[in-house]
Image: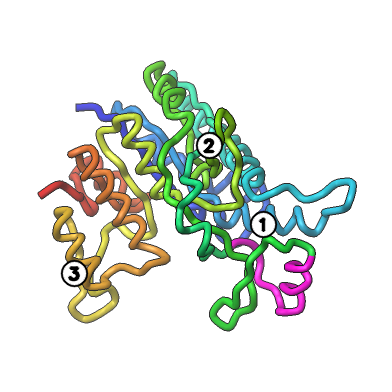
Amino acid sequence: MNKKIVVALGGNAILSKDASAEAQQKALLDTASYLVKFIENGDQLIISHGNGPQVGNLLLQQASGSTKNNPEMPLDTCVAMTQGSIGYWMQNALIQLLKEKNIDKSVATVITQVEVGSNDKAFTNPTKPIGPFMTKEDADKAKKENPNFTFIEDSGRGYRRVVASPKPINVIESQAINALVSAGVVPIAVGGGGVPVVKQNNKLIGKDAVIDKDFASEKLAELVHADQLIILTAVKNVYINFNQPNQKKLEKVTVSELEKYISEGQFAAGSMLPKVKATIDFVKASGKSAVITSLDGIDDFINNNEGTIITND
């Protein structure tokens, strides 16, 4: 049966070392060649993506070119800007491949706002590093110029700005995204976890924060009543005892089993843990399955149901 699927890509699937537009467009053409397999399979596809490397580079460019008359843009606006640029590149790549395969399908990027709670505890404890490494002197200077910024020393590599990473509670454009899917369009949405906003009366106020794209993708999958959430990462399967002699690949796994592994500290906080938690949230909320696999594992997933498949108990 054809399914409505939310597929979440990491920002590093778009940019590795070469930050030029040309290199990122080429990477996205390669990425799109895998994603188009879902469309060939008859699935209704919604694509989300990270933007960590891209927004970090953009913040650096903004800061270096900032003047009194042309000040740098705030973080929420930079997230929106990278949603637009990455979406533009991805649209082009998908449209090219769909035309080559004689598939009549439109693709559209939705600049997506994701609501977070104004009282989320993350705002009092910013932990998400963004932007470049800097010396203590440069961090002190930046702090003086921007008193609301927070900087921390990062693993002996220098100082970095940190911002809040609140949990998403709503995707403002979810109905519009669902309408596009119903019309046969492939939406690209919640890029970079979405633009973080809080509601104040009838206004949406942007916040200097970064929403984890896996949690934002999960919330979107819930709201559009997706049949499946697929999170793509660097490996085809999730492992326990990773890189140890007793390493074990997880293929079919239940929510309670994953929660047990989380309590054992099996998944790294900065990499696999948010992906696992997001899939658990989706399965619990929807009663449907979620998948963690890699781009080059898509064929094996579509044809043989391979990857790490997460289900209810």
- Seen from the viewer's position, the closer of residues 11 and 122 is 122
Query: Badges 1 and 3: C-beta atoms under 8 Å apart?
Result: no
The residue under the point 58% across, 83% down is 156
Q: Secondary structure at mark 3?
A: strand
Q: Is residue 192 visible?
A: yes
Q: Earlier in the sequence, mark 3 or mark 2?
A: 2
Query: Marks 1 and 2, how far apart in space?
Result: 29 Å
Q: Amino acid at mark 1?
A: Asn
| Front of the two marks 1 and 2 | 2
Please give left or right for residue 151 compared with residue 286 in the image.
right
Q: Is residue 101 visible?
A: no
Q: Earlier in the sequence, mark 1 or mark 2?
A: 1
- Circle 3 sits on which residue? 248
Asked if 175 appears above or below 213 in the picture, the reply is above
Asked if 141 appears above or below 89 in the picture, the reply is below
- Seen from the viewer's position, the closer of residues 233 and 81 is 81
Q: Secondary structure at mark 2?
A: strand
Q: Main secondary structure of the magenta part?
A: helix
Q: Is residue 11 magenta?
A: no
The residue under the point 26% across, 48% down is 291
Is the residue marked by circle 3 packed among few (<14), some (14-19), or many (20+) residues within 10 Å? some
Query: Marks 1 and 3, how far apart in space?
Result: 37 Å
- Circle 2 sits on which residue? 199
> What segment is highlighted magenta in the picture?
130-144
The residue under the point 46% across, 52% down is 120
Instruction: Name, please, the residue furthest toward the top.
Output: 183
- Circle 1 sits on which residue? 57
Query: Marks 3 and 2, how far apart in space?
Result: 44 Å
